[in-house]
C-alpha cells in the first residue's frame, strides 16, 4: 500500500502545464485507434473508455483537460471519452472490437482479466503493473451495506452490534423473517440485493465479500476455498433472498431508490452510490443508512494505458499526461465532490464540504481502519467465484 501511495504522489506531482482535449472519431481504419481524420492532422489520438459508474466524473475531467490545451512533443492531444460497463469493455478489448489507448474500468479485477486473456493470445500483458506507464487508480470507493434506516438498528442489535456476513446469512434464511429478529412483522422476510456479478463490478465485489465473510479472512482467498461445499451453500442461501440481479450499474442504482423496502432491506453497493441513494430516498418516502461490512473491499477505478507494438511513444506519453491530470489535486477534488475517495493522498477528505464529510450522520466513516482492508483475490479465484455463481444461481 505504501508503494502505491508513493507512486500516486509522484504521478500527481508530475502534472505539468497545459493540455488540450478535442475529440476522437472511432473506426476500424487509420491505425490501432481508428480514423482520426476529423481531428487535426498532426494530433495524437487518445481514446478513453470509462466505466459507466464514473462516466460523469470522467467527462468533467476531460472537459477541464480540454481547456488547458495539452500537447505532446508539440502535437495537440485529442481525447474522446466514452462510457462502457467494465465487463463489456473487457470482452471488447480482448476481441479487439474496442481499442482504447486508455481505459478506466471499475476495478483492477477487469485489468487482470484482460491481461490474462491477452497474454494467452499474445504472450504479454497489454496493461503494465510497474514502470512509467503502470496502472494507477484515479479514485476509490469501498463497498458498503445500504440498509433501510428503520431496519438497520434492528439488524445491528440482532447481530450483536456488527452486521457480519454470517449474521446476514442467518437473517435472510430465517423463515420467521423480521419478526424473529425483533422487527416489525409487517416487514416480512429479510430481503437482500446486489447487482449481477457477471456483468456489474459491484456485484462481483459482493461475491468477494461474501467469501471473505464466510471464512473470516482478509487475504489469500483461493480457488480451492471457493470450491468448498460449505461456501457454495452459504452463497446460494444468500442469493435465494435476492429477487433479481440488475445487469447494469444504472439499472441497479434505479432499483435502490425507485422501489425501496419493497425491493430490498439490505443491499451491497459502492459508498458513493449509497450516498446518492441516501440523498434521493427521502423524495421517495423512505430513508436509508450506510453500514460498513467487517471486511472492506475497495473499487479502485484504475487508469490503464495500452502498451502494444501499435502504440508509439507519443501515444503513451499523451495517455500518461491524461492520467497525471486525473491525479492532479484539482481533479481529485472533483472526484471528492462526486462522493469518491481521492486516489491522490495529498487531497484530504475530512473537514471539507464534500459528500463523505457531510454524511457522517448517515454512517459514512471518513477514515476507514486499515486493519479491515481485504486484499483483492487473484484472477483465478475471481474466475472460480464467477463459475460458482453461474453454476448455482445464474438468474
Image: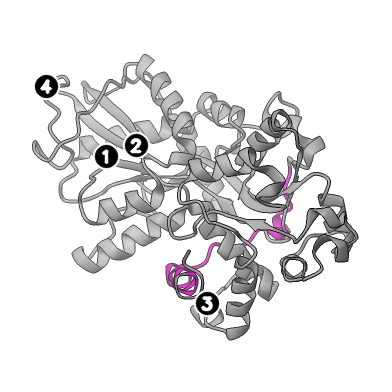
Residue 330, position as x, y percentages in the image: 53, 23
Q: Is residue 349 magenta?
A: no
Sequence-wise, the earlier of marks 4 and 1 is 4
Residue topped by disc 2:
320
Instruction: For marks 4 and 1, give the one nearer the viewer.
Output: 4
How many neighbours does mark 4 have within 10 angstroms: few (below 14), some (14-19), or many (20 or more)? few
Residue 203 horizontal side relative to residue 318, left or right: right
Seen from the viewer's position, the closer of residues 386 and 328 is 386
Mark 2 and 1 residues: CB-CB less than 8 Å, in contact?
A: yes
Give the spatial CA distance, label 3 vs label 4: 51 Å
Q: Mark 4 or mark 2, which is nearer the start of the sequence?
A: 4
Q: Secondary structure at mark 2?
A: helix
Direction from residue 191 to residue 124 in the image, left or right: left
**Where 306 falls versus 239 (above or below)?**
above
Residue 81 sits above or below residue 209 on the image: above
The residue that mark 1 highlights is: 316
* Residue 134 visible (yes or no): yes
Give the residue drawn at x 80%, y 64%: 177
- Between disc 3 and disc 2, the foreground one is 3
User: How many residues crowd mark 2 within 10 Å: few (<14), some (14–19), many (20+)?
Assistant: many
In 3D space, how far apart are the residues under numbered discs 3 and 2 (Cα atoms)?
34 Å
Q: Is residue 374 magenta?
A: yes
In this rendering, the label closer to the viewer, 3 or 4 = 3
Boundaries of the magenta span? 367-389
Amino acid at each position: 500500500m505504501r508503494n502505491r501511495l508513493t507512486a500516486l504522489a509522484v504521478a500527481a506531482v508530475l502534472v505539468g502545464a497545459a493540455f488540450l482535449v478535442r475529440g476522437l472519431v472511432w473506426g476500424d481504419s487509420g491505425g490501432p485507434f481508428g480514423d482520426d481524420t476529423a481531428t487535426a492532422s498532426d494530433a495524437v489520438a487518445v481514446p478513453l473508455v470509462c466505466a459507466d459508474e464514473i462516466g460523469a466524473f470522467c467527462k468533467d475531467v476531460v472537459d477541464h483537460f480540454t481547456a488547458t490545451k495539452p500537447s505532446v512533443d508539440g502535437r495537440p492531444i485529442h481525447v474522446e471519452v466514452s462510457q462502457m460497463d467494465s465487463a463489456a469493455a473487457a470482452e471488447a478489448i480482448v476481441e479487439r472490437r474496442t481499442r482504447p489507448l486508455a481505459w478506466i474500468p471499475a476495478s483492477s479485477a477487469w485489468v487482470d482479466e484482460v491481461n490474462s486473456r491477452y497474454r494467452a493470445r499474445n504472450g504479454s500483458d497489454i496493461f503494465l503493473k510497474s514502470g512509467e506507464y503502470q496502472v494507477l487508480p484515479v479514485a476509490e470507493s469501498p463497498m458498503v451495506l445500504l440498509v433501510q434506516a428503520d431496519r438497520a438498528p434492528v439488524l445491528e442489535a440482532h447481530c450483536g452490534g456488527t452486521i457480519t456476513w454470517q449474521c446476514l446469512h442467518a437473517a435472510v434464511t430465517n423463515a420467521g423473517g423480521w419478526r424473529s429478529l425483533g422487527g416489525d412483522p409487517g416487514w416480512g422476510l429479510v430481503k437482500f440485493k446486489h447487482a449481477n456479478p457477471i456483468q456489474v463490478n459491484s456485484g462481483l465485489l459482493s461475491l468477494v465479500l461474501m467469501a471473505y465473510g464466510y471464512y473470516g479472512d482478509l487475504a489469500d482467498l483461493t480457488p480451492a476455498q471457493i470450491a468448498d461445499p460449505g461456501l457454495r451453500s452459504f452463497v446460494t442461501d444468500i442469493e435465494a433472498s435476492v429477487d433479481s440481479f440488475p445487469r447494469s450499474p444504472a439499472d441497479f442504482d434505479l432499483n435502490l431508490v425507485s422501489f425501496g423496502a419493497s425491493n430490498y432491506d439490505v443491499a451491497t453497493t459502492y459508498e458513493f452510490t449509497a450516498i446518492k441513494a441516501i440523498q434521493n430516498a427521502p423524495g421517495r418516502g423512505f430513508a436509508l443508512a450506510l453500514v460498513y461490512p467487517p471486511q472492506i473491499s475497495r473499487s479502485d477505478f484504475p487508469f490503464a494505458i495500452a502498451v502494444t507494438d501499435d502504440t508509439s511513444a507519443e501515444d503513451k506519453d499523451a495517455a500518461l499526461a491524461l492520467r497525471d491530470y486525473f491525479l492532479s489535486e484539482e481533479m481529485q477534488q472533483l472526484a471528492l465532490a462526486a462522493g469518491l475517495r481521492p486516489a491522490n493522498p495529498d487531497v484530504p477528505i475530512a473537514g471539507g464540504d464534500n459528500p463523505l464529510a457531510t454524511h457522517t450522520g448517515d454512517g459514512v466513516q471518513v477514515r476507514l481502519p486499515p486493519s479491515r482492508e481485504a486484499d483483492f483475490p487473484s484472477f483465478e479465484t475471481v474466475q472460480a467465484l464467477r463459475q460458482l455463481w453461474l453454476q448455482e444461481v445464474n438468474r
